[in-house]
Image: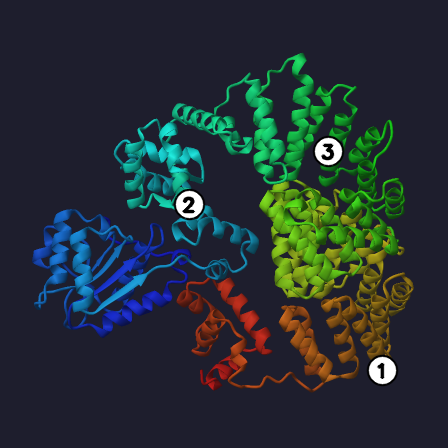
Amino acid sequence: MTPPGGRPRACDFEGRLAELATAERFLVANATGPALITVNGEPGIGKSRFLATLRESLLRSGWRPASPPPRFSRVLSGQWLLRPAAGPPLLVLDDAHLLPAPAAASLADGLSRGDPDAVQMVLGHRPGRVAPPLAAAMTAALARIPALYLELAPFTLQQVLAFFGGSRPAAGIRSLYEAAQGNPQYMAIVFELASAGEALTTLRSEVDDLAEPHRTVARAGAILGETFDAADLPPVAQVPAEQVGAAIDELVRRDVLRVVHNGRLRFRHFLVRQAVQRAIGLWWQREAHARAARLFQARGDAAPRWAEHLRRSARPGDLTAARHLTRAAAATRWRSADLTTQWYAAAADLIPETVGTAARRGRLLLSQGQSLAATGQLAAAREAATRALDLIPVRGWRARRQALLLAARTQRSLGHFDEAAALLHRAAHGGSSVAVTAELALIHLMRGEFDAAADAARAPRDQSATAFAGQLALAHCAGGDRRTAAAFADRLGGIVDATGDRELAPLLETIAWLGWAEVLLGRYRQANRRLSRAAAVARETGQKHALTNLLIGQGGALLRLGRLHEALECYQEAHTLAVASGSDHLTMTALTTLCELHSWLGETLAALEHGARADALARTASGWCAALATAAYAHARLESGDTSGCVEAILAACGGPELPAIDPGSRPRWYETLTRAAIAEGDVEDACGWAKRASAAAGGEGYGALAAAHMALVEGRSDAARGDALDAARRFEAAGDRIDAMRARLVAGTATNASDLLHRVVRDATECSATTLAARARQALARSGRPSVTTLTPTSLARLTRRERQVAELVAAGHTNRQIGGELFLSVKTVERHLARIFDKLDITARAKLAAMVASDPA
């Protein structure tokens, strides 16, 4: 027996406050006689932590440790407590299902007694595992004495997200949460909050304690997969069927295995399966996989069904196994990029390195490289493509061209544009193709050669190739030919919308570039819808490289739509993937997006930090994205109030006053930014010049009108400023650009002290979490003498979430942020984030105002 003990960690206990309060109230209400609390939950759910926390809470309330009553002292140990006033002793006992028979009988006797010597008990146990005498006594006690049944459920995703408080990307937390199924012990492993080795050893002991052949059957199940048929266990385990049946019954009883749909079996959790796999010897493991492969192959199952078993059991030189693995990899290419990569690699390793096998190994390396690129392993993909070129003979020109294209794409994704262009020129020998010219257009685009990109996009004879339409649309758009870009986007968008999810997998890369083009065209809603759908397919199929570009595009669409927190999730996930890919170019691009977004969220330090890192990477790079990185950093400094040198930095990054390093469609926005920066630096004459450029730039009427409004405002022409700004707001709103529409209304409201416009900005910006714009609108209201008024009505607090309401009530009680964090098991940073959202939602800036609102709320 291991009594409950140890200090609870916030990550373990977050979300258990309601159950703790319920248990404490029950013990207070039944202080004078026997009572029972049962705490039930699956392994790892947090029963031990809950009991330890309950005990510590009672000790803080004045209870004191005690010795067990005489009749329990010899057979039962646990945590005994005595309350300050008179009353029976309390036993807090964990793992009641593991009690030996004498202790279980003694405990059952204590529950059955009705005399004054009876005790109170809090028992933690697994479902369905309590010894029959104790289970019967507990059932009888439920009808005779006060009893409380607490079942600890898995954590919800919202509870886990609240605990991390934005310290990790929400998308990454969500995927790990789903893997752990909300179980705290498993989350401690997958979130690296505990020692994975120790935790897996603990899980492994559940199987090591089994007798044979139960242990062997469990190991055979771990070999067979996530789910498996009971009928497959005897040949793999090499155990008679009748013994396998008994072993299954025992494993299900112990909750090591569970029965799922159609009678199939699975382990309680994938970590339990991993723990079992760790205990299998290498020789037995290989032989068991070989038996499984032979079983499924003889049964006529498709190659992907048994390819993994073949990969783990085939020996070098087995050309038949290599052929089967190659076929299985080709069949799963668009369903699981990770498996495909592993199977191609295994097939290549099986083939001897001889002159006669060079061409075959070269083609396998090419296929492996394509899968590596899809999973975001760019350097490894480039290496595979290079090795493939060394092995594929000159007469195999089609395969050589594919290898050159793969090498060029990985070089471009890594930011090596010159090397990528050289490879493409080699691929174009003997005749170009739409694949080559589409990739060349992208390289010109990334270099900042926008006219050349548009020219390359016009070159292919086959302009209807669906697989490259997104690249061509983006090249036309960035080159200034918005009409042709829109035609490509319309055609490809219609195809995407009419295609099922399963068939989208081969098109994810071109959909990503389509999304980028639609964002540049101002089609934010269409871009978000298509990119969101494609991103889900990319996650399901393991195409991490395409996912990176899909998320960057989707984040851009969401940002303009004013859905800033959703955009933040996209950008954070993209940044994680970019860093994992090893591409400084992709990492710089993701940091640039985070810099801009944090500026609008009002998180100045984060914006400047991301901007500085992006700028540092841009100093060793060149091209379109490098120019945007440095310009975004200058913009973040401008938004933070550090105006010195912003104009100079933007011009240096973008190639001078004509902004040649920025795509034509984005130049109006940057001219408007330069107008604001020059005004902030006190150079009105230069600002006027930038405003004129913004108005003259094609396709930027909204930014031209907004730049003109800035100039009218600084020159004292209030009515003109209002008119130009409202014109800009209408144009932005028509495109669905809420952020720029709010910026324009802010200028209009500031120009004429129009409280209605400023109040609308406060409301819209608060709804979008655009803290910077909300704060500026409030400042403008304060300067106008018409401060923002918050009505203290009972419905004002209804906009808060449950957690925000808890924080608000503790603020009203006079707690500091640190005290609130201690009370709710939250970090101080998380409390600060909750307060920022509360202030924005309620349109207030002071804790005293919040306290007054809480006091006036009857709820």
Q: Position of residue 225 (x, y in %)?
A: 45, 37
Q: Secondary structure at mark 1?
A: helix
What residue sits right under mark 2 in the picture? 262
Quarter where residue 582 is shown:
top right
Q: Give the mark nearest the N terminus, 2 or 3.
A: 2
Kind of residue sitting beneath label 2: Asn
At 68% from the left and 25% from the top, the residue drawn is 363
Q: Foreground mark, 2 or 1?
A: 2
Q: How far apart in space, not on screen, are marks 2 and 3 (Cα)?
A: 44 Å
Q: Foreground mark, 2 or 3?
A: 2
Q: Foreground mark, 1 or 3?
A: 3
Pick the residue in front: 178 or 746: 178
Kind of residue sitting beneath label 3: Leu
What residue sits right under mark 3 in the picture? 406
Q: Give the mark nearest the N terminus, 1 or 3.
A: 3
Q: How far apart in space, not on screen, are marks 1 and 3 (Cα)?
A: 58 Å
Q: Secondary structure at mark 3?
A: helix
Q: Secondary structure at mark 2?
A: helix
Kind of residue sitting beneath label 1: Asp
Residue 94 in the figure: left or right of residue 516: left
The quadrant of the picture occupied by the C terminus is bottom left
At 78% from the left and 78% from the top, the residue drawn is 748
What residue sits right under mark 1 in the picture? 719
Residue 537 in the figure: left or right of residue 467: left
Residue count near mark 3 (Cα–Cα under 10 Å), binned few <14, some 14–19, many ≥20: many
Q: Position of residue 547 (x, y in %)?
A: 65, 47
Residue contact between numbered discs 2 and 3, judged by CB atoms under 8 Å: no
